[in-house]
Amino acid sequence: MPEQELLIGQEMNTLHAGSSTDGINVGNAGRTRDTQTGVEGETEIGSDEEDSIEDEGSSSGGNSTTERLVPHQLREQAARHIGKIGRHFNILDRLFKKRTQQSSDIQQGAMFDGVFSNLSAKPDTTETEGNNEQDIPPTYDEAAADMAPSYYGMDLNNSDIYYDEICIEGLPVGNIANLLWNIIVSTSFQFIGFLITYILHTSHAAKQGSRFGLGLTFIGYGYSMIPNDVTSKVGKNKSLNRMELEDPNEFDDVRLNSQSTTQDKFESHLNHGLDEEKQNIPWLAVFVAFLGLFITLKSIYDYIQVKKLEKKYLNQSQNQA
Amino acid sequence: MRSSYQPVSTTNFEHENAIPTASSSHNLLMSQRFDDSPPSSNDNSIETNITPPPEPPSYEFDIEDPHDDLHKRTHLQRVSIGFQEKILEPLMENIIHPLLQISKFVPDKADYYLSKIGNPFILRRFFYIIFMSFIAYYVLSSGYLFNEKASGSKGMFSQHDILFEYAKKSVDLAKFERDLEYISSMPHGSGTKGDAAIYRYIQESFDNNGLKLVKEMGYSVYSNYPGNVSISYYDNKNEKHDLELSKENFNPLSSNGKLSKVSLIYGGKGTTYDLQHLKDSKTIEDGKDYVLLLQYDKLVSQQVLIAEKFGAKAVIFISEPYGENIDVVQSKPVGLPQYSTGDASGLNWDGSPVEEKDHKFWRQTHIPTIPISTRQGKELLSRLSSGGVTVDDGNSDRSNSGKMGDVLIDVDLQTNVREKHFIPNIVGKIEGREQSDKAIIIAASRNSINFGTTYPNFGTAALLSIVQLFQEVKYKFGWKPLRNIYFISFGGTEFNYAGSSELVEQRLTPLKDEIYSLIDISQLGIPFAEKYENGKTRGELSIETHPLLKKFFNRNAHGNFDISVDNVQHYGDWTPFLANGIPVSVISSDSTRNRDTPTETSEDKFERVEKILEDEQNQQSVKDLLVYLLHISMELIDDPLLHFDIISYVEDIDERLQRLEQAYPEKLNFTSIIKGLLFWKKIGSEWASWTQGWENIVWSHGDGIEPSLLSINRWTWNKKLTNIGRRTCSPAGLPNRSFYKNVLFGPTLIQEDKSKNGGNVDFWTFPGVMDAIYDDDWKRAQEQIDLIGKVLHQSAALFVEETNDIGYK
């Protein structure tokens, strides 16, 4: 059990590094360390739940691989910092986190604690100096080795709609049905369909589906803008087969032998009526059609990329387990 | 609660760290392996256990090295390798890769700037939408896309003004002339090789115009073709003189026969009055054979019928001259549509013989008829002695009838008969978008045993031009009619309207369900500008139509034409439709309708019309005519409400009833009809008020948007209106003429005024009553009137009741 918890904590820490902040600290280790103290106080209350989990994880002993690589406190701080940034950029997370938070009672009553309300966020000045020295971000190798996806399995609450979903860039990947559904809605309602599906998308599949639909809509716009060449559609300039017959009054053998007959060459000099000249396709049509094509291809490409990534994460987590 | 959480992002310092991380997270995730070379000293156990970060995305296709074993590969493989090398790879390198680079770079940059405003994760979403909205707005407001004006519609319906404006400009007179020239370039009698070429041409023209559904519907019908013909007369010295005849001396559907040394009697126009006069004066007698020499009248078939009735053994028709030319021969068909139109062989379309072989099913004369020229007619007339009686020639001339034995003639007519000969109708269709179970037919007859430029080719060429105009409007505006349009080129016209009759016979029920109007344009001609009013030229058009549509045609009087609207007054390809209650409209030029020469002669050639068409005013007339045709057919097919006016229908019947009453006062009791008419009048006013309400809601207030509840109501009204015509039929048909089921409108069997004083008798309304009156059978006449009353009443009751389609069958 403790081993398991440790793993969770570990996953969570590295996850933020992997997704939202992705190991930026490697290059800027010193700078990050400097900022730690200033930021920490502000973030602590917000990240209370994670803290509690992390605490559980860290208290279970320092024998794990991670513990050997990076000192515990440093790891904790880095995680907190990274987590904060991650949350900051992840609206959905914040949205869904809220609910979990309300149901948990870990910090219940903290707001009604008078002057001590922010007690838990109070910086521990005695430890800070020592911490600073240990507050080294993970090396590239560590970061690279940690492929755990950002929020995978973090939330153990089964009621969550993203339970067991892999989030990439703060969005769950979503499945093919999601993609198709959004393509259908986005395409059939044209631009309005795109607006609705894109504003409301909650997964990569939905997002890319929505974009795909937009692409198709644009291609459709491009097509509609192609000038209508009525003249050639009704075949005004096409000449019909006007064969001349030698024996039009023949009534027993009425088969027409087109090769042996001559053509009626009559040409009328009368008005041909509105002979619409073939208009050039407006550049806008070309642009819009290509834009549509690009959006369509790009959406498919992006979705495949995200899917690949998801697959890798899944493989890795299986390997880890 | 979480106020301490928010200020985090507000510090500049925070941004510096966060921006690049958040924005480039995706890229870094995917490419981190290549970003920095990992320090080799940091190798540890994790590295070995856990798979390295994912490969960068591969957008190249996984293809084997093309240079490998090139010679071993199949042709297909070589092609595919060549494709890869020459197209795919340069494409990837020059287009796809740079594009991908841009696509990576642009979001990064965008994120960077977005993060200066706020949370890029949310903003990205909105900015993407805003950006795309701008593009979409620009595209939509560019004017290149369809808008209401461009699509010629207002709300849910078409704006016909815009469509007509366009149609006016795009009338293709050159096509009209080319078509007319080709169709007139050879004789094309039904079932001949010439017709095969012409109907192929029509089919091709339909196809070329992009008409999707083009079908050839062929029938096997009784046909005959010119064969041997000879007429010789004996002079006083018993010397035989041959008339010089050719294949032109031919009346389609004439019977074969040979007579020798039979008396020739001149009968003027061969009316019952004339022949009775001859009989009364003992010029002709029962049991004595004679050949009747007649001037052509308007209804040739009736002349033959009467001649047969009076015992003539053959009829020789004298053609009218064409101007100074007295050598032309009018080859008028002599099929008998009086009893029924269609295949003259006396067989049903499935090959079974018709049950009654008596005169009720006559479709063909029993005596030979031969047309001769005016010159030859004069020659024969000059041989007749001054004995006998004088008869009216019809044009205020009077000639002697001659006497039995005066001039003896030999007549021999052997036509080539084909009992079952293939005759096609060409049918094209434009699908409707709303009530696609309802349709109109625009039809033209096709066949002519001569060149037939004025009739029927002018109508056929007009049909082809109308199709093109419809298609142009369709393509230009993405227009589709509310209901279907059929374009039909009928074959077999000269064989007792075989093409159209067989079509009706085969598909009677579907036709009655679907067709609510047939417009025949075969008898169109150049509407010569005859009057000048305010410098404007006005041609004349005569429209014969069903009373339901009279108001429509009167209202649509065209600025360029004087239009006279009346009931249908003559036979044609529309007759079988008329007989079954389908409202028909025949648009014609007077001269063509009356078949003035050179119509139906060999002189009816294209050169004549070509000369006429050189005049710009006439060109304009033809153009106006085509646009007018488009106009009325479009109003009929694409106006949301059917243009059937019940009140004017009732008024029209009432007026005709009054005329009948005046002609035969106190002989008949019209109460039942009047009751029926009153019932209809009530329905009529209901329909009129509903129409007004609809117009108010949809046009005045709704800007062309029709509430769906109203649509359903409208469709029901339309459906019920289309049934009015067919409900005026009696399943048993007229007495002795069961083919004619329409008790209100149809031909009277013998269309002549026995009293020979009025000349203004309507032979095409209440045919059953008129037949009985002709026979002096007043009891039957009263029965027929009661039948009409009953039919009117029942159909009105059904109209009120019905919500679904119920035919009388």
Image (cartoon, rainbow, N blue to C red):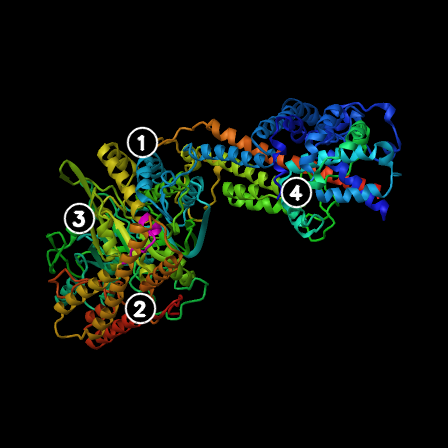
- Chain of the residue under label 3: B
Is residue B75 visible in the rendered image? The answer is no
Is B105 rendered above or below residue B685?
above
Q: Give the amino acid at mark 2.
A: Arg
Badge 3 marks a residue whose secondary structure is helix
Number of other residues with Cα within 10 Å of mark 1, as a class: few under 14, some 14 to 19, many 20 or more: some
The Cα atoms of the two marked residues, 2 and 4, are separated by 112 Å
Which sits in the foreground, B346 or A81? A81
The label on residue A271 is 1
User: Which residues lie in the magenta part?
Assistant: B634-644
Which sits in the foreground, B286 or A185? A185
Tag 1 and tag 3, C-beta contact below 8 Å: no
- Chain of the residue under label 4: A
Q: Give the amino acid at mark 3.
A: Lys
Is residue B797 visible in the rendered image? The answer is yes
Number of other residues with Cα within 10 Å of mark 4, as a class: few under 14, some 14 to 19, many 20 or more: few
Number of other residues with Cα within 10 Å of mark 2, as a class: few under 14, some 14 to 19, many 20 or more: some
- Horizontal relation, residue B502 to residue A91: left or right: left
Residue B642 painted magenta: yes
Residue A204 painted magenta: no
Task: Please name the residue shown 43% across and 28% down the image.
Answer: A279
Residue that mark 4 sits on: A115
